[in-house]
Amino acid sequence: METSFADYLTAIGDAFLDPQKRVFVGYLGAAFVIAAVAFLISAGGNRRAGFAALRNRVLSPAIWWSPSARADYKLFAVNQALMLGLAPRLLSQVAVATLLFEQMHLLFGTRPSVGQALPGWAVVAAFTIVQFLLDDASRYLVHRLLHRSRFLWAFHEVHHSAETLTPMTVFRTHPVEGVLFALRAAIVHGAAIGGFVFFFGDKVDLATVLGANVFLFLFHAAGANLRHSHVPLSYGRVVERLLISPAQHQIHHSTAPAHVDSNFGSVLALWDRLGGTLRLAERGREIRFGLSDGPPVADHALWRLYLDPLRAAAGTLRRPRTPSLQEHAP
Amino acid sequence: MKNLLKSAAMATGVVAFAASAQADGHLYGPFLVTVKGYQGDAKNSVSYTGQIARHVLHDSLKALSGGGNGKPNPDLKARLTSYFSGKEDGRAIVAPASKEGFPILQTTVKQISGKKNLSGKTYGGAVSGWPNNMTGAEVIAFWIDKAAAADGGYDMRHGYEYPQLISKFIMGAVFYNQVVDNYLDENLDADKKPNDQPYSKGAPYTGKEHSWDEAFGYFGAPAHALELTPQQVYDIAKRSPKALEAADRNGDGKVDLISEMTFGPAYYAASFDASVYGSSNETRYLHRIVKAFLDGRKLLADADGAKLTDAQRTTLKGHAATIEKAWQAVLAEAVFKYAGSAYKDLQAVQSVLDGKGDASKATRSYVHHWSELKGFSLALQTGRANLDETAVKLNRLIGYGPALANQSQVIGVNRDGAYLKGEGPTLGEYMLHMLKVQQLMVDAFGVQARVNDKLADIKGLAGKINAGGSAEND
């Protein structure tokens, strides 16, 4: 057995201790502070009302200990073990980068010395920006595919079946979708690394804060965790055309038919604008989360979340059009 | 007070003696004579002067083979040949020679050992990485012939630096091959060089003891290597004045080539250990090899002139396996390093050509490093085990000659000994070959030090970007 229980515990711990991860304790703390400030401001400075909103929408056991949230935690625990075993067997960033790097030698017949003229800081800036843009764009595209493809929606449904949202809902993911995202990361990051190293060699580096891409750090520190929360933080009609706010992502999770298939983006709103899927936040509108407007699903049984998608996905292969659960909503 | 001082002096003496005894425990020799019925006066059974003589012949041959002026030179060729296959008494030690701050004891080969040559101990199999199925000795003789007529040892038309080719290949074809395919192989068996008989009539050492000593001699480490750091062992080979004290174990003010000097194989082992000392990919090739030699020698000393038991033989073969594996890894590390050097040189050549400059200096550096790469890659193939597909890949990737800027490459040698050139890979393709050579060394030999790793940038960057292997959504 190559991996051990200690490796598993490390993986669990890393989720909260690694600044490259969404639920790094620092980011969770920042999100909490932002939520508190946001509620205080929207309560017009009324501390009592502000804290009441914080209690009901952020700290309530009805959210954190709901059947839906408990399923989030179980999925997190089981997936960490599964991915520990799977991850080494998947295509890696290094493999993709090396392949591209090597093939470019053949493509160019040499290794161009163009990169030697550029100053180091310019190369670092270019790589950091390009890596971030490629990452964000590919996340949008894959996310959109997860909704558009009947086969893939069978797995992505697991994430959308959440009826309460907490930062841990980011881990409410079917392993098949997890593998797909890992492949996306390997291909995109590998291509960026391989391409840049070929031209700029050891000048290439990532601009980081606490070890994370500086753009990713800013995204997380500015409350990315609130995307999966009951805090309808909006950035306003101007900024929301540039950056996806937590409120916009909550619209993405909304059961309302009008909100279906909108706001696929992670950080930038650009891709949704180009793809015609951008929807701005609607002030004062209460949103329900989940798959349908009907009664909440009482059962978030772990085995159903893992196995039902396999059956449903197989079903999409047999018949030309299998309607999704969401379309069946009354 | 007097008594107190006396006791203190005695105590210090005891401590000093104990310290030196412990230090002696790390010394390869002296060991007592164990041969039953020995009649002579010798007190020490350790002897490997023949091997040190061959190291000196090798170092001298390397130094001399850069002495050509570009025109045919029969005198130089004769001199080179005498250091390769001659046995004359008069041969001077051309290298390693004394220099300011590093005085060396011996000045002639005979002062170390007489009637020794390299060609008689050279790998006799076919060298498949060189054209025309030549034996090891034939390849070296071929290169000697070319070196004598080359300018400073360089043949820029075909991309060879002969001193490097000759030297690095001898490190494999003579030293490595003799050790792993002879002394530490058949000679450890029960029916060869038995431990209850002298190695030869009247000798003060048994068959096994002397085989083991000769193997140690071929590695080329100072007898007190375990008392030194890899950096010190490296500096001794370089004859650096700052290393004199470390080298001069017996404190006589001179470096005795027989037991206090560092030669080729040990020098390279030390160089890798020193280059990654204290880092996450630290290696300990030098100490691992020397300690295995020393442990084996102690086992033989303890056997006290009796036939080895099965258990003793098994332990001894275990030490031999340790030596073989580590030595092979050192050769693979060298191939890895020089593939990286050649890659870097090709980048430099391309850069100069892009700037429409004169690439001759950059090309010379490329030819120099390529020749080291080629010599070591051939050396790696002179071991005990057939390297099968690894050898085929290695030879194909490197080729008979370096890829040259006009997309030509040596593809053979005709019956008159002249090189044949043909279409070679582009510089970009050949750089890719260098990357693949590095990858091959990692895959086939698990090299750790990885000096000049041309894929290190990629691995470093990949570590800074979240690989997304934890099933997270958005």
Image: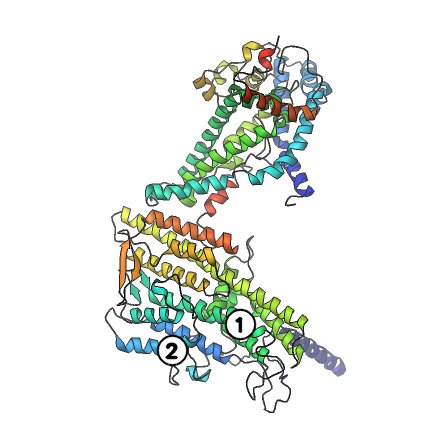
- Between residues B326 and B119, which one lies in front from this camera angle? B119
Outermost residue to the front: A318
Where in the figure is residue A95, as x and y percent of width and height?
Answer: 48, 41
Looking at the rendered structure, the kind of residue marked 2 is: Ser
- The colouring scheme, among rainbow, by chain, secondary structure or one colour, is rainbow
Chain ID of residue with mark 2: B
Residue at the spot of label 2:
B85
Chain ID of residue with mark 1: B
Nearest-to-viewer mark from 2 and 1: 2
Where in the figure is residue A239, as x and y percent of width and height?
Answer: 49, 18
The tag on residue B246 is: 1
Q: Could you tell me if residue B98 is visible in this image?
A: no
Q: In this rendering, do the residues under marks 2 and 1 share a single chain?
A: yes
Where in the figure is residue B36, as x and y percent of width and height?
Answer: 64, 86
Where in the figure is residue A153, as x and y percent of width and height?
Answer: 56, 21
- Between residues B124 and A133, which one lies in front from this camera angle? B124
The tag on residue A324 is: none
State which tag comes first along the sequence, 2 or 1: 2
Q: Residue at x 61, y 13 (%)?
A: A42
Q: Residue at x 46, y 50 (%)?
A: B439
**For the residue carrying disc 1, how many other residues have a C-alpha within 10 Å: few (<14), some (14-19), or many (20+)?**
many
Judge whether B242 appears above or below A7 on screen. Answer: below
Secondary structure of the residue carrying tag 2 is: loop
- Between residues B37 and B355, which one lies in front from this camera angle? B37
* Residue B311 placement: quadrant: bottom right
Q: Is residue B134 left or right of residue A88?
A: left
Judge whether A81 appears above or below A170 on screen. Answer: below
- Between residues B49 and B312, which one lies in front from this camera angle? B312
**For the residue carrying disc 2, how many other residues have a C-alpha within 10 Å: few (<14), some (14-19), or many (20+)?**
some
Q: Could you tell me if residue B383 is visible in this image?
A: yes
Looking at the rendered structure, the kind of residue marked 1 is: Ala
* Residue B414 placement: quadrant: bottom left
